[in-house]
Amino acid sequence: MDATSYHRPELVCPAGTPAGLRAAVDAGADAVYCGLQNETNARNFPGLNFTPAELKQSLGYARAKNAKLLLAVNTFPPAGRFDLWRAAIDDAATIGVDAVIVADMGVADYAASTYPDLRLHLSVQAGASSPEAIRFYCEAFGIKRVVLPRMLTVAEIAELHSEIPCEIEAFVFGNIGMMAEGRCSLTNYVTGTSTNMQGVCSPAGAVQYEEDSERNLTARLGGYVVDRFGCGESAGYTTICPRCCPISCAPASPR
């Protein structure tokens, strides 16, 4: 198979702010994904994300540049608080985003039953890594694309692709963070918040740095020692499970 036989993948980039979205689109991103300024997305940090008005304005900018805008509604609603996630889906449908990235089955069911024309992607947070699991989501909720867990090899991704009825998206940058794992629960225990439900891992208010007389640095999270750095050693942001906002690729599709 020569190079001309391949289809160029769709480059999907994260955008934490309207300015970030414009930069990603201007740099050539085929699609960007972003979140609202609340607990419905897994990057719910102060100073990041979009209001509904900003999302609508940013959609116009992306469309003018022939790019897509995806909204991440990819956390899990705690009991009794589903209204916030329902409102996020309503906003996505009203604004007219190109797709919504969901993880929770209840959110997926609400979106599919209320807005059958709203395109749904399955978040990596759902942890669907087998053909059986992916086919279930496709059949039950009309999922059009699955974002695959990051621990899969290229060979495993290729095998999956031949067995499922939807598009695939795979990360090309980022660590193996699943978010549905023990370390996320540990973060919740230490700080009272988690990425899975509140969209915040290691909130800044729970991070403390202490320097001793020899200028060694101790980093604490919620009062617990997480890291120690020697004098002159670069210190990173304190998390129990380091992660980042990765870039991903998906098969190109007609605009």
Image: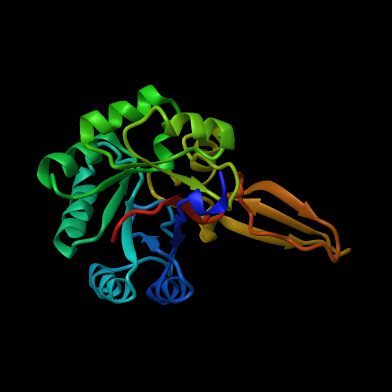
Query: Is residue 205 positioned above or below 60 on the image?
Result: above
**Residue 53, percent across and down?**
23, 73
**Residue 67, percent across and down?**
34, 67
Decide which of 180, 138 is in the foreground and name it. Answer: 138
The structure residue drawn at horizontal position 24% and vertical position 41%, both measured from the top left corner, is 107
The structure residue drawn at horizontal position 41% and vertical position 57%, both measured from the top left corner, is 44
**Residue 114, percent across and down?**
10, 44
Decide which of 64, 177 is in the foreground and name it. Answer: 64
Query: Is residue 18 positioned above or below 96 on the image?
Result: below
Q: Quadrant of the C terminus?
A: bottom left
Q: Quadrant of the N terminus?
A: top right
Instruction: Say if residue 170 shows up in the picture.
Output: yes
**Residue 217, percent across and down?**
78, 59
User: In terms of image quadrants, where is residue 75?
Assistant: top left
User: In terms of image quadrants, where is residue 153?
Assistant: top right
Query: Is residue 197 positioned above or below 132 on the image?
Result: below
Instruction: Say if residue 36 shows up in the picture.
Output: no
Q: Which residue, as the protein is rendered here, is positioned at the far left?
A: 114
